[in-house]
């Protein structure tokens, strides 16, 4: 029997964390011996892990912590396959394999694509990342990118062809999404005759909800029937709330925090909006598609255009352009996509379908 380990910092409410839980659970249900190793045993997705699966922690999330802990764990456990997420964990795992000479195969999962130009504050981190990509990633047994664009970006970043690189899309949903979507929503305000917009994502720079708020301010001036619900938590919540209050949008824009069931909100929207600067994939787009919802997304690197088939399954607009985002949302409201087409297209991203693809590469 294959013995598989998944390593990730924690099981907080991010897309990569949910993907790892979905794959690990899928492996366990297919009879594999599966364990999860966390930097810290925290996060809302802990409750979603298969009850028979072992979960351990090393007590920290730094590169040094992983570099010290992993060699002993690898030698003791003798895993057949080790899946990693994040550059630091992946680098530490590859180095640990080399120093211990274990036969475990290291499968790096790559979940991001960054803009070509970033603020100076990211320079140091970006240089470390590029060094990892160039000198350590090529030593991985396999590299699994979550989109074709993400793999192309990684090849450019690493300056290598990465012949072991493949694309497997994220395992996003199963039939439970349809049950969860039917649960009644307790709206914070009346939605009678309103045009409902929903956004789901961490309140961080990458998700760029400030561009969405600026676009909404434009829309609201054109039509006061618009209302916006944003689900997620993060470091920018207070500054976003200040923007809402400064622009007198308190009665039409609501920051709802993290919800383990965003699907009930999605199912009630007219348009689902993603305003990100960059994405590796974009799980929420698939979730909205599965519920038959018309989507507006920024055409950011690198998942949205692939998921939306370059606009055939949704509307794309430039990154960080509030006026363009507002205009695109108006277009989506006036010309919604065919729900049956969206639901059919989403089926390639079911958990069962993607787990099969992961099993095939072991």
Image (cartoon, helix red, strand yellow):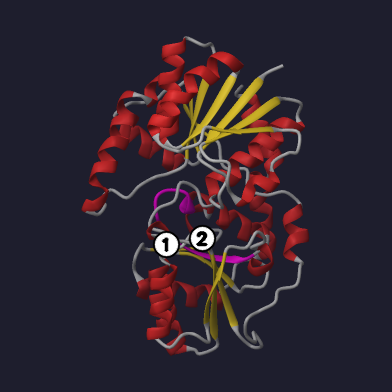
Q: Quadrant of residue 341?
A: bottom right
Residue linked to disc 2: 201
x then y, percent, for residue 48: 69, 46
Residue linked to disc 1: 235
Residue depicted at x 72% and y 64%: 181
Q: Quadrant of residue 68?
A: top left
Q: Is residue 61 magenta?
A: no
Q: CA gap, disc 1 to disc 2?
A: 12 Å
Quadrant the C terminus occupies? top right
Q: Earlier in the sequence, mark 1 or mark 2?
A: 2
Asked whether the residues under the numbered discs 1 and 2 touch, taking CB atoms below 8 Å apart as contact, a structural biologist would say no
x then y, percent, for residue 213: 42, 75
Q: Find the residue positioned furthest to the front.
A: 59
Residue stretch in magenta: 293-305
Q: Is residue 301 magenta?
A: yes
Residue depicted at x 65% and y 41%: 22
Looking at the rendered structure, which numbered label has been put on residue 21? none
Frontmost residue, 318 versus 2: 2
x then y, percent, for residue 264: 69, 67
Q: Find the residue positioned furthest to the left.
A: 120
């Amino acid at each position: 029997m294959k013995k598989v380990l998944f390593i990730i910092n924690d099981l907080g409410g991010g897309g990569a964390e949910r993907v790892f839980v979905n794959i690990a659970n899928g492996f366990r249900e297919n009879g594999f011996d599966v364990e999860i190793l966390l930097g810290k045993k925290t996060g809302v997705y802990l409750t979603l892990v298969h009850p028979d699966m072992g979960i351990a922690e090393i007590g920290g999330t730094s590169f040094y912590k992983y570099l010290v802990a992993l060699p002993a764990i690898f030698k003791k456990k003798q895993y057949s396959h080790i899946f990693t997420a994040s550059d630091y964990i992946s680098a530490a795992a590859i180095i640990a394999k080399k120093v211990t000479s274990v036969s475990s195969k290291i499968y790096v999962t790559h979940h991001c694509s960054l803009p070509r130009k970033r603020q100076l504050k990211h320079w140091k981190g970006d240089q470390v990342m590029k060094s990892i990509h160039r000198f350590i990633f090529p030593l991985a047994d396999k590299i699994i990118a979550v989109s074709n664009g993400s793999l192309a970006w990684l090849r450019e970043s690493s300056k290598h062809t990465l012949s072991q690189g493949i694309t497997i899309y994220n395992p996003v949903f199963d039939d439970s999404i349809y049950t969860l979507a039917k649960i009644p929503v307790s709206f914070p305000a009346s939605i009678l005759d309103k045009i409902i917009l929903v956004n789901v994502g961490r309140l961080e720079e990458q998700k760029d909800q400030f561009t969405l708020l600026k676009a909404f301010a434009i829309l609201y001036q054109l039509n006061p029937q618009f209302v916006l619900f944003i689900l997620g938590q993060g470091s920018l919540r207070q500054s976003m709330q200040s923007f809402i209050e400064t622009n007198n949008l308190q009665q039409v824009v609501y920051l709802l925090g993290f919800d383990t069931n965003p699907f009930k909100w999605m199912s009630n929207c007219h348009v689902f909006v993603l305003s990100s600067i960059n994405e590796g994939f974009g799980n929420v787009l698939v979730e909205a598609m599965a519920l038959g919802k018309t989507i507006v997304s920024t055409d950011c690197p690198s998942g949205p255009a692939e998921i939306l088939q370059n606009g055939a399954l949704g509307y794309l607009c430039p990154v960080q352009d509030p006026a363009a985002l507002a205009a695109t949302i108006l277009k989506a409201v006036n010309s919604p996509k065919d729900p049956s087409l969206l639901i059919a297209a989403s089926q390639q991203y079911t958990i069962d379908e993607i787990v099969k693809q992961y099993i095939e590469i072991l």
